[in-house]
């Protein structure tokens, strides 16, 4: 991947044919928004091991430690954003379980539109992809601000909302 180009990849492309490439704890020099649409797995993010399943959005800032163990049935995409971007992205890693069907469709549509721009390689494709990435960032900020993502009876409910962590 070029250091200046935004890129959309399937999870299979992200692992480059070796599941171990994602399963070992590592950091990346790009920001990553990972959208799981099918299957289950385990995630190591921000020092915590968590389960993940369908309709999980994972944001990993550049330089953050992560590991993904994906099951054989797992499908999804990763949007890789250069670290030197001017987009307003989160500074901390987060995992969001998206329960609202409208929000799920919205993120899927944004990723599909960015992938279409990448595939067709029309003039100004990178500009269009950056615009879609900006909309993904807005979507992510809106989802984090939504109290529906905080599990009920969470003893750390206030902390969950402030540091964007899942209980």
Image (cartoon, rainbow, N blue to C red):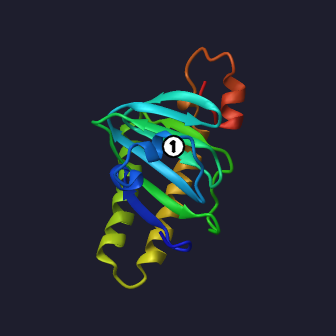
The quadrant of the picture occupied by the C terminus is top right
- Residue 50, compared with residue 106, is above or below; it is above
Q: Which of the pair 53/3 is nearer the observer?
A: 3
In the visual, does 12 lie left or right of 137?
left
- Image position, residue 52 (x, y; %): 44, 31
Residue 140 position (above or below residue 40): below
Q: Residue furthest bottom?
A: 123
- Residue at 66 percent across and 29 percent down: it is 160
Residue at left 53%, top 54%? 32
Q: Residues within 10 Å of mark 1 (few under 14, many from 20)?
A: many
Location of mark 1 (residue): 58
Q: Is residue 138 left or right of residue 92?
A: left
Q: 122 and 24: which one is in front?
A: 24
In the rendered view, does 18 fall on the left or right side of 141?
left
At a point 38% along the width and 85% down the height, the residue shown is 123
Question: Residue 106, image x and y in percent?
Answer: 39, 50
Q: Secondary structure at mark 1?
A: strand
């Amino acid at each position: 991947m070029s250091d200046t180009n935004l890129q959309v990849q399937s999870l299979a492309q992200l692992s480059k044919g070796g599941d171990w490439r994602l399963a070992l704890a590592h950091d990346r020099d790009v920001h990553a928004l990972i959208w799981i649409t099918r299957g289950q797995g385990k995630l190591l993010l921000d020092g915590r091991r968590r389960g993940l399943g369908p309709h999980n959005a994972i944001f990993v800032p550049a330089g953050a430690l992560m590991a993904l163990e994906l099951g054989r049935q797992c499908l999804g995409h990763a949007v890789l954003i250069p670290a030197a971007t001017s987009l307003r992205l989160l500074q901390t890693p987060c995992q969001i379980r998206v329960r609202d069907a409208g929000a799920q469709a919205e993120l899927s549509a944004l990723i599909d539109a960015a992938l279409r721009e990448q595939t067709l390689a029309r003039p100004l494709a990178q500009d269009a992809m950056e615009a879609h990435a900006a909309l993904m960032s807005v979507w992510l900020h809106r989802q984090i601000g939504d109290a529906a993502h905080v599990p009920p009876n969470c003893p750390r409910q206030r902390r969950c909302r402030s540091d964007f962590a899942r209980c």
